[in-house]
Image (cartoon, helix red, strand yellow):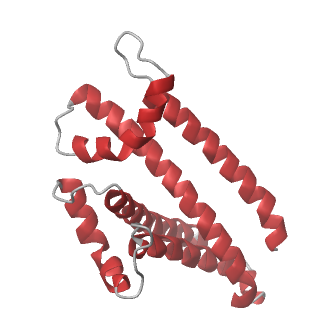
Amino acid sequence: MILDIFNFLLDVVASFFGYLLLLRFALQWRRISFLNPLGQFVLQATNWAVLPLRKVLPAVGGLDMASLVPAWLMQVLVKLVLLSLKGGAALGVGALLPVALVMGFFELLHMAVMAVIALLLAQAVLSWVNPHAPMAGPIRALVEPLLRPLRRIVPPIAHVDLSPLVAIVLAQVLMMLLTYAKAALMPLLF
């Protein structure tokens, strides 16, 4: 029971910071201003990890690796700890590291898809409730590149934009594909 509580708390903390780092990565990738409540929160919560890494991890093709790499490494570290606690310590870190690296990558992809779904839901709700809320602009800017191609395929029905619904369904399909890919890859790693 204590181990389950520790696993849960470790996963919550790592996921929280992982999502913030992914959000920082996405905001910088889309060149969205951090001069809003969401941006300010993300900056203040992640500067401790990103600013020191900027000195050693340059941007690649306009992508901020100093935000993406710590999100991945945090997931790798969590997977290493959890694998070690579940009896993998006998195998040694050398045997667990490749598994943790792959599991951390899949977890980061899973988190990215979940973040997209959450942003799509938030954008849909804000567009109905308060389209001029301070958070609406950055969220809209993040999801618009995903929705724009879908709007060409899925026309509005009675002035209702169904593209967020289609995007969420496609994201769920991507989650299923990631789950199957991870399940197929895991036996090869052990």
Q: Quadrant of residue 135?
A: top left
Is residue 83 left or right of 29 when viewed as pictured? right
What residue lies at 56% left-to-right and 58% top-to-bottom? 109
What residue lies at 47% left-to-right and 34% top-to-bottom? 149
Where's residue 35, x and y in %?
16, 58
Q: How many marks?
A: 0
Check the image and name the residue furthest to the top.
158
Which part of the image, by quadrant, shows the N terminus?
bottom right
What residue lies at 40% left-to-right and 74% top-to-bottom? 59
Is residue 150 left or right of 42 when viewed as pictured? right
Q: Quadrant of residue 144?
A: top left
Q: Nearer the viewer, residue 153 or 93?
A: 153
Where's residue 105, x and y in %?
60, 67
What residue lies at 80% left-to-right and 58% top-to-bottom? 184
Where's residue 68, x and y in %?
45, 69
Where's residue 116, x and y in %?
45, 46
Check the image and name the residue furthest to the front.
61
Is residue 47 left or right of 25 when viewed as pictured? left
| Residue 25 position (above or below residue 98) | above
| Residue 165 position (above or below residue 104) | above
Q: Nearer the viewer, residue 23 or 78?
A: 23
Which part of the image, by quadrant, shows the C terminus?
bottom right
Q: Quadrant of residue 18?
A: bottom left
